[in-house]
Image (spheres, grey):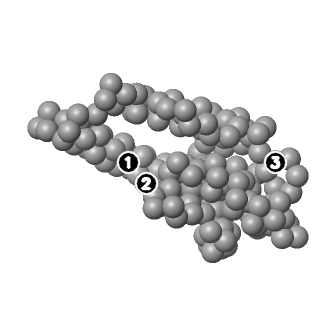
Amino acid sequence: LQFHFPRYSELPALELYMDQVLGIVNQSLRIFATDGENILTAAMVNNYVKKKLLPPAVGKRYSPKHVAHLLFICTLKPVLSVSEIHALSVLECQRLPAQEAFNWFAELLEQSLHSVFAQGQSGAPALSQSAQEPLVRAAVFSFANKLYLQKYLVWNAALSEEKNTKKAKENKKHPAEA
């Protein structure tokens, strides 16, 4: 309930080396780690760069923008694929400037965690029949939300492709037709 996701202004303003970036991301998201494992490794960062989910470092240094991208990616990677995270990031940055989108995401994450975990604040009973129902509801609700997001991203990609195809056809018209 006390989790704080960093806002863009709280990220280090200076450029950082890989080990510093890993430390910041892993420390910021340590509450999400299981069995003390790191949320982010250097190999993961390199993979995100290869898949164009993250811009490459400039002279082995990472900017606050890189850190923000990595926090966003690492928060969503347990539930979304890399391509889905990329598509969602693109959509969000079309709606808001990147820093505002990041801060909005941070606030929404904190509100969502508080809403979900506050339900169990009254003391979690032993897993009886009545206690199992909210767990199953949470699982089904998670599935429904993930499916909704996946279907929307596929629909949006198809719509964008259709617009691009239409523009390409219009550009191929004979000059006299234009």
- Type of residue at label 3? Pro
Q: Residue 129: image x %, image y %?
A: 11, 38
Per the image, label 3 sits on a secondary structure element best described as loop
Q: What residue does disc 1 label?
A: 146
Q: Which class describes the residues within 10 Å of circle 3: few (<14), some (14-19), or many (20+)? A: some
- Is 114 or 145 nearer to us in this picture? 114
The earlier-in-sequence mark between 2 and 1 is 2
Q: What residue does disc 2 label?
A: 79
Residue positioned 88% across, 70% down in the render? 59
Q: Is residue 127 above or below residue 32?
A: above
Q: Is residue 62 above or below residue 151?
A: below
- Type of residue at label 1? Lys
- Is 121 or 81 nearer to us in this picture? 121
Q: Give the side of residue 147 with respect to residue 96, left or right.
A: left
Residue occupying the far top of the picture: 122
> Alpha carbon of mark 3 to alpha carbon of mark 2: how far?
27 Å
Residue positioned 63% across, 74% down in the render? 43
Q: Residue 87: image x %, image y %?
A: 55, 53
Q: Residue 131: image x %, image y %?
A: 19, 35
Per the image, label 1 sits on a secondary structure element best described as helix
Residue 173 seen in this snapshot: no
The earlier-in-sequence mark between 3 and 1 is 3
Q: Which mark is residue 12?
A: 3
Q: Give the side of residue 100 with respect to residue 58, left or right.
A: left
**Labels 2 and 1 touching (C-beta < 8 A):** yes
Q: Which mark is residue 119?
A: none
- Is 94 or 107 nearer to us in this picture? 107
- Type of residue at label 2? Val
